[in-house]
Amino acid sequence: MNPWLRYAITALLAAILILFTIRKTNFVVPKSWSHLAPQSSSGLPTKVIVIGKLEYEDTTWVSRDLPEWQNAVYTVDNTSATLHTPMNKGRESIAYLTYIIDNYDSLPDTVLFLHSHRDGEFRAWHVDNEGHDNVESVKALRLDYVAESGYVNLRCGIFPGCNHEVQPFRSPPIDGLEVEHAMHDAWKFMFPGEELPKEIGVPCCAQFAVSKKQILARPKTDYERYRNWVIETQLHDLLSGRVMEYLWHIIFGKESI
């Protein structure tokens, strides 16, 4: 074959390939989506798993065992990581809120907030299925129910956390119930002008799914205020995380109990 003809054919095929690739990837993937998954007709992924992890923790199980989900895994103790939080405080809450703030204008249909562990009777005792396996819990999740309800706790068991776990006005106060003592100032900061409920209860332990519509029911400034509380509060890491654990369902439109 004439060398010039061979060159022309090669160039033409390369151009066709480039055009095809551009047509297939004509949307910009937000920086926090780290694993490709099926897209909706809008070009945005329909579902994302959000996790906060310590640098040493292995979260490769998410991409390996739940490949149909995108994931955004935030490292909370290394600000040089590709996805990271402003600081390591408030347990998983700092990662959850950072994701919402970073992606408020480009949210998927469903956001699933999970812990970094997959399974294990010790670390994942609160995952109430046989084997305490988060992968099985995710696979059993009904996305149509999430869309209908807005917020769905992944834990079905009511203990600990329900029904009247937190009673901020308990009289007399009980020593050791730090969450109750901390709730007054936290509520005033996060929900200014709203009355603090007499009782708050929700199944533990801050693993839940939320619809895009439910997240957008609050303005971005609300989530920025919640994260500012986590960062600025004098409460230690565990206690600030526990306070948030009892507020997620309220943040996402549910009654206090």
Image: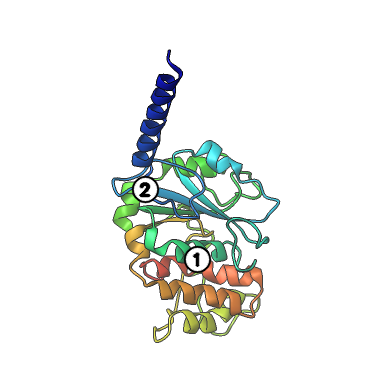
Q: Residue at x 60, y 60 (%)?
A: 84
Separation of marks 2 and 1 at Cα, in angstroms = 19 Å
Q: Is residue 94 left or right of residue 55?
A: left
In this rendered view, identify the residue nearer to me: 158 or 194: 194
Which secondary structure, mark 2?
loop
Q: Residue at x 40, y 36 (%)?
A: 18
**144 in relation to 87, above or below:** above
Decide which of tag 2 and tag 1 comes sooner along the chain: 2
Q: Residues within 10 Å of mark 1 (few under 14, many from 20)?
A: many
Q: Quadrant of the N terminus?
A: top left
In this rendered view, identify the residue nearer to me: 9 or 139: 9
Measured from the top left, where is residue 237 in percent x and y?
65, 70
Query: Label for residue 243?
Result: none
Q: Which residue is mark 2?
A: 46
Q: Amino acid at mark 2?
A: Thr
Query: Label for residue 97?
Result: 1
Q: Is residue 164 left or right of residue 44?
A: right
Q: Amino acid at mark 1?
A: Leu
Q: Residue at x 57, y 68 (%)?
A: 242
Which residue sits furthest top? Answer: 1
Measured from the top left, where is residue 91 in percent x and y?
61, 64
Which residue sits furthest right? Answer: 56
Measured from the top left, where is residue 125 in percent x and y?
60, 50
